[in-house]
Image (cartoon, rainbow, N blue to C red):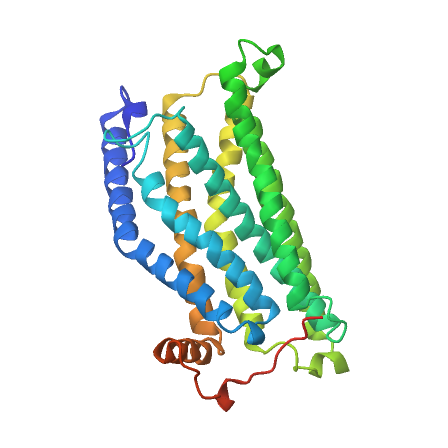
């Protein structure tokens, strides 16, 4: 899958190491495509269906996880094309400069931005819910509207890649586009908006959460709004998302810094950078499979919601008998 052509002419040991790493990453990618992609598609779809079929019992964290699940479905659908596509295969169906590649790049960037900002906003809303549990500032109703703005902002931000692509084709006619024929500026924008901003927001939220958990106040005893397991789910999600996405954004930053120096990059370092970018992209795609599994195993309400969904499917068009056990405490949606 990954090419070692950039290391031609180097020492035999380095070329052999590259071949070994190439084989290892190819095996990991193949295993992910065989096992990880079906798991990601299945569990993300299940997460969405289970929550949408029980809208009355959805909480604020559920809305954000549905948002991340939709982004995970996009990533799972794009994974085979990215991990087995150009420039790593000889049987690619399009070239790097084609419209299809730009479309896939935009979809990938949108999914990454939605994932990172959903994680950051989940952290901030969790703090609001703990600090001000009776104000309904982090209600389901407000969260749904916030998620709509997240998707809109992600689309607007990702169109910077489309702008650079257009300018690379019309630069001969528009002099202003002559300075925009590279993607380093777009990568720098993505690193700033897609990683630095949500990363700072998460750190700020976690600092506030840790402080309020140490304070023994009457508000901390009010557990009628969020269950205790939500904190464990939040920490696990933050660690997973930022742990798997940080290498991707660091590789973009490294490539931007090397190119901005204006000096030719040695083939050895360029080969390492390409290897790091491919490995980081593999880790980023794997987040679409790990996050729904965390939600499935930590969320204590998920099994009961799944049982109600299965019961509804068995009932079909007939009215199902009322299940008293399906009534759960619901966050106010006002």
Q: Does any portion of residue 206 appear in the rendered image?
A: no
Instruction: Return the x and y of residue 67 as percentages of the image width and height.
Output: 53, 58
Q: Name the residue located 43 percent from the left edge and 49 percent from the top edge.
A: 74
Q: How many marks?
A: 0
Q: Is residue 80 above or below residue 328?
A: above
Q: Is residue 128 visible?
A: yes
Residue 312 located left or right of residue 191:
left
Residue 26: which quarter of the image?
top left
Residue 147 vs 111, above or below: the answer is: below
Image coords of residue 329 (percent x, y): 60, 82
Q: Nearer the viewer, residue 181 or 264?
A: 181
| Residue drawn where x is 28% and y is 24% of the image | 5
Residue 189, x across and y down, in percent: 60, 34
Residue situated furthest bottom in the rendering: 324
Please state, as top left, top right, bottom left or bottom right, where the N terminus lies in the image.
Answer: top left
Q: Considering only vertical position in the picture, is 161 above or below 263?
A: below
Image height of 331 relative to 61, above or below: below
Point 75% across, 79% down: residue: 219
Residue 91 horizontal/vertical position (percent): 23, 31
Q: Nearer the viewer, residue 91 or 297?
A: 91
| Quadrant in the picture for residue 308 | bottom left
Q: Quadrant of residue 146?
A: bottom right
Is the C terminus in the top left, top right, bottom left or bottom right quadrant?
bottom right
């Amino acid at each position: 899958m990954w090419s070692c052509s950039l290391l031609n002419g180097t020492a035999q040991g380095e070329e052999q190491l590259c071949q070994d790493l190439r084989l290892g990453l190819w095996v990991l990618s193949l295993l992910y495509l065989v096992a990880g992609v079906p798991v990601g598609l299945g569990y993300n779809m299940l997460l969405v269906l289970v929550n949408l079929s029980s809208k009355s019992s959805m909480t604020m964290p559920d809305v954000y996880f549905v948002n991340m699940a939709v982004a995970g479905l996009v990533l799972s659908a794009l994974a085979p094309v990215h991990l087995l596509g150009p420039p790593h295969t000889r049987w690619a169906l399009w070239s790097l400069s084609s419209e299809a590649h730009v479309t896939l790049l935009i979809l990938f960037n949108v999914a990454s931005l939605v994932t990172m900002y959903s994680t950051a906003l989940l952290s901030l809303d969790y703090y609001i819910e703990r600090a001000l549990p009776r104000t309904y500032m982090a209600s389901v109703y407000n969260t749904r509207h916030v998620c709509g703005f997240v998707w809109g902002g992600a689309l607007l931000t990702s169109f910077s890649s489309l702008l650079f692509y257009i300018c690379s084709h019309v630069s001969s006619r528009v002099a202003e586009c002559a300075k925009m024929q590279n993607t380093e500026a777009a990568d720098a924008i993505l690193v700033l908006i897609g990683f630095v901003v949500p990363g700072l927001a998460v750190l700020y939220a976690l600092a506030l959460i840790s402080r309020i958990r140490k304070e023994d106040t009457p508000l901390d005893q009010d557990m009628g709004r969020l269950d205790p397991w939500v904190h464990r789910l939040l920490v696990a999600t933050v660690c997973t998302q930022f742990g798997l996405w940080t290498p991707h954004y660091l590789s973009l930053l490294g490539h931007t810094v090397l190119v901005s120096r204006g000096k030719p990059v040695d083939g050895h370092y360029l080969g390492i950078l390409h290897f790091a970018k491919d490995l980081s992209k593999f880790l980023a795609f794997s987040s679409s499979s790990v996050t729904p599994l965390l939600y499935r195993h930590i969320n204590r309400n998920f099994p009961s919601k799944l049982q109600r969904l299965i019961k509804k499917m068995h009932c079909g068009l007939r009215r199902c008998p009322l299940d008293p056990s399906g009534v759960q405490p619901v966050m106010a949606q006002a």
